[in-house]
Amino acid sequence: DIQMTQSPSSLSASVGDRVTITCRASQDISNYLAWFQQKPGKAPKSLIYTASTLESGVPSRFSGSGSGTDFTLTISSLQPEDFATYYCQQYDRYPVTFGGGTKVEIK
Amino acid sequence: EVQLVESGGGLVKPGGSLRLSCAASGFTFSNYNMNWVRQAPGKGLEWVSCSTSSDNYTQYADSVKGRFTITRDNAKNSLFLQMNSLRPEDTAVYYCARGRWLTVTTDFDYWGQGTLVTVSS
């Protein structure tokens, strides 16, 4: 199975900060990478797919980049509603697998 | 509006069985691959199973293979997960999720709110 490693596992940031989350795949997955946001007690919500395509309705402060094995989710200016846990997911190879998550907390 | 509503979760003893349901609306259900993804308490996400749009192909995670069965009823816009020989490690919130692409390997564009399965004596 392809292992997805996210870093950091948690971070503290302030409203207005630029936040970057990294996801590394254990092998080349081209651009078959998605990002999800999950708030406590809620279902995951799709943010980005094919590494950099923004889901409809997702604010433009979210962006994704990368290909191959290294990927990044960036929030350009953190808003109060962005405090959540973020997961990456590869869908290049069966079985699809997720990263361990990055919890974004208020500083 | 796309909606996925899971039901059927609950408390079950080890070795027991449970059947989860997912009622879909707001899209042409028969055109999409549908999946179950689970999340153990305080843990990350784990893909469980996929049913292709025509129900002629199913796939399972190794952790549930031989114990869980995914089915769908396209006429009733419903997805099911029959879970047998349940183990404590199957305790999780189970989400129904729509596959974005018509491949088993896909990301998920819509998720239900989840249903909690607790396996404990």
Image (cartoon, coloured by chain):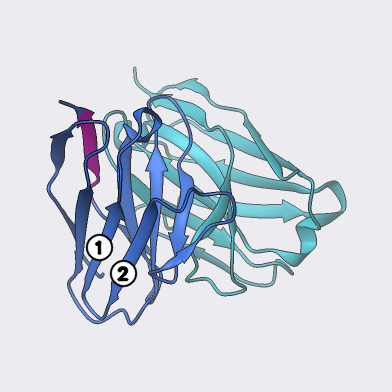
Residue A25 rendering spot, x and y as whole percentages = 21, 70
How many C-alpha atoms fall within 10 Å of the one at disc 1: few (<14), some, or many (≥20)?
A: many
Q: Which mark is residue A80?
A: none
Q: Residue furthest right?
A: B75
Q: In this view, does A78 lie to the left or right of B30?
A: left
The image quarter containing residue A30 is: bottom left
Q: Which part of the image, by quadrant, shows the N terminus of chain B?
A: top right
Colour displayed for chain A in the image of the structure: blue
Q: In this view, does B29 lie to the left or right of A44?
A: right
Q: Is residue B73 left or right of residue B68?
A: right
User: Callout 2: helix, strand or loop?
Assistant: strand
Depth check: B110 or B32 in front? B110
Q: What residue type is labelled 1?
A: Thr
Residue range of the region highlighted in magenta in the rendering: A100-105
Residue at the disc numbered 2? A65
Q: Residue A72 carries which label?
A: 1
Q: The cyan chain is which one?
A: B
User: Callout 1: helix, strand or loop?
Assistant: strand
The reply to whether label 2 and label 1 mark residues of one chain is yes
Q: Does the magenta stretch include residue B14?
A: no
Q: Which amino acid does label 2 sit on?
A: Ser
Residue A101 rendering spot, x and y as whole percentages = 25, 45
Q: Which residue is drawn at 48% across and 51% down?
A: A46
Q: Mark 2 or mark 1: name the one nearer the start of the chain.
A: 2
Residue A20 rendering spot, x and y as whole percentages = 20, 53
- Are discs 2 and 1 less than 8 Å apart at CB? yes
